[in-house]
Amino acid sequence: MTSQAQLQIVTKRKLNLNGKIGPTIHCHLALFFIALWTVTCQAEYFSSIDSIPVLAIAEEDLIEWYGNFLDSQEQDFAVYRNFLERVKEEHELALEDPEAYLGNPINAYKLIKRTVVDWAAIVGNVRNSTALQALKANLTSLTSAMPLPDISELRGAAKGLGRLQTMYNLKTPDLADGVINGVYYGSELSAHECFEIGSNLFEAKEYPLAKEWLQLVLKLIYKGETARIKTSGDFYGDFDGDVDDEEITEPEANEVSGIEDEKQQTKEALDAEMSRNRAEYDNEYDNDDDDDDDDEDYGMEDLIYEPRYGVFAPVVLYDWDENGNIINQTDIERSDNLNNKTSAFDQDSLTNKLLNETLEYLALTSLELGERKETEIYINEILDINPEHAFKDLLLFMNIKESQNRAAFDSLIDLQRYEWFANYSRLCQGEQVEQKERHQLKCKLDTHNHPLFILAPLRKEELHADPEIVVYHGLLSDKHIVDILEQSEAHMVRSRVGGVDEFTVRDVRVSQQAWLTYHSPTLKYIHRTVSAISGFDLSNAEDMQVANYGIGGQYDPHHDFFDNFDHKAKSPWIGNRIATHLFFASDVEQGGYTVFPLLNVYAKPVKGSMVMWRNLHKSLDPDRRTLHAGCPVVKGTKRICNIWVRSGYQEFSHPCGLVRDNHKSAYVK
Ligand SMILES: O=C(O)CCC(=O)C(=O)O
Ligand SMILES: [Fe+2]
């Protein structure tokens, strides 16, 4: 199956094209769509699930172009090699007795002919290689049509992963092992990939999370990739007769007891796993097809095997228990075993480069976290490998850094300190605190006393009584949704959050969005249905917002009404946002719930359904209980459509009461 077919993407248009056109046209069309997409969208790949497939298409083209280039070069090289061998033979003959050789007019002629014709042809060929020129032209058209993601994208994606970790309490070792919320997705991360995430989290100032990932890299390097991360005690080698117990600086290692033959079995299993993994590791870094001695090139023999059973890590590493929680993190000491370590590491190896960079980032991370002792340990490690390393002077600089205020951090991990966060995170995982009132809520078929719904009653699910939050299921068909996505596709931009700083793109909302008017048949249907259900006058509603969420895409807790709403301000609409109608235009494999942390309510995204609630009291004062959030998407795609109705013109359908009712949310600060 080609990658085109695998990517069940992007749009209907794209899928239709697959069946009808050949690969060359496809190539141009891909470029065309990329160009179209670029003109209309900011290059914010991680914030939109639709942008990632565009990248995949680009990569598919790159694979094809480089493949063609290499194929044609291979043929050329075979011709060159042949020519070279022949010339070499002649040349050697000539060297035996140059005078006699060149004295022969035929030989003299052949030499001149080779220089004038054959060599000139080869030099010309290399200079004007059509294959190289074609590759260059393709690359130029690709990069001018589509800015490839830059480092800020990568940082955003790393932060997205961090957001998922924080919200769903996902443990770093689990993620690295390809396990998300207990589901194994078969995509383990290598030490290099963990380093990429760790270093990018550092650059995104997510220091505590960065440290976890970087610690994990250290562990993978020192223990070998096979000793995947969690502590079961077995990895620490005390079952291996070769290891001197005194060398083991990790306290847990010695404490683990077990029956001898069980240990032996574990060791055998690990050995088997180790060889398997080693083969994979070799493969991963095997750039050289005919070279079977990769161990020598990369120092892998030492790095994978020795440290795991024999040499001990110079810095005590984080341990993770079986649930992925960190243990031992404060117990950081230097080991005395440095001699072994330096002999075990090949200074030029890829892995040693990774080790150096990891230690550098760890030193900086600890510095940012104000952990003086650890920073010192990491710096000493670095200086041990290279005494002239620039970090020599960091020890002096440390004194200044240390005095900085730790509380100034605004990191994802810090979120967990807040009281409301626990509830928010729980609801995102589909867990509600048990509540008596919930038992009065119903699911029912509802004709709403409206002609539209007599024959096809609404499927209504009550989520909360006061303020009322209800879900209507099955309002949008797949056809409606495809139509909405097609209309919005070309207009998607990274979401901005409203408020004072309206035009700043922030992490508060990580998604892409577009606005649609109510002119197409689908939008007219939605307009009609929403006004029939809610009774609101939709002539005073905002256009429909269409949004999608990418890796870790989410919307922090917020209200939909505008705080301190200024009734006199110029606006196309009258009044504040009285009600929200939120459609789910996709199912989501994991995550992406809409939650109301103050009301103990969550709504799981179900394709085609609509959640509806009022944001203002009857008195039109803001109802602060309606604080809500879009939880980060763990897996899959989340698409939503929002219709916000304004409070003007709603006086007859939704009159205010005789008594002001804003006291209901007075308790919310
Ligand atoms: O994505 C969600 O579930 C919530 C979105 C939301 O609250 C909004 O767009 O205002
Ligand atoms: Fe909202």
Image: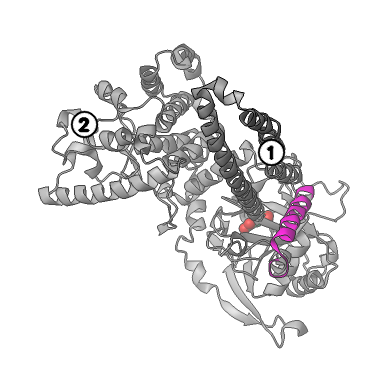
Q: How many numbered discs? A: 2
Under mark 1, the amino acid is Asn
Task: Please state the horizontal and vertical placement of residue 203, each as a whole percent of the image.
Answer: 55, 32
Give the overall secondary structure of the magenta segment.
helix
The local crowd at label 1, few if under 14, some if 14 to 19, many if 20 or more residues have their Cα within 10 Å, is few
Residue 279 as seen in the image, left or right of residue 18? left
Residue picked out by circle 2: 248
Residue 504 as seen in the image, left or right of residue 393? right
Task: Please state the horizontal and vertical placement of residue 663, each as a whole percent of the image.
Answer: 65, 54
The label on residue 250 is none
The local crowd at label 2, few if under 14, some if 14 to 19, many if 20 or more residues have their Cα within 10 Å, is many
* Residue drawn at point x = 57 percent, y = 45 percent: 74
Task: Please state the horizontal and vertical placement of residue 53, each as a whole percent of the image.
Answer: 64, 55
Under mark 2, the amino acid is Ile
Residue 665 highlighted magenta (yes or no): no
Q: Which residues are magenta?
A: 18-39
Residue picked out by circle 1: 125
* Residue drawn at point x = 45 percent, y = 44 percent: 289
Q: Which of the image's four quarters has the C terminus?
A: top right
Q: Is residue 669 visible?
A: no
**Camera-side residue: 460 or 356?**
356
Instruction: Give the Cα distance between marks 2 and 1.
Output: 61 Å
Per the image, label 2 sits on a secondary structure element best described as loop
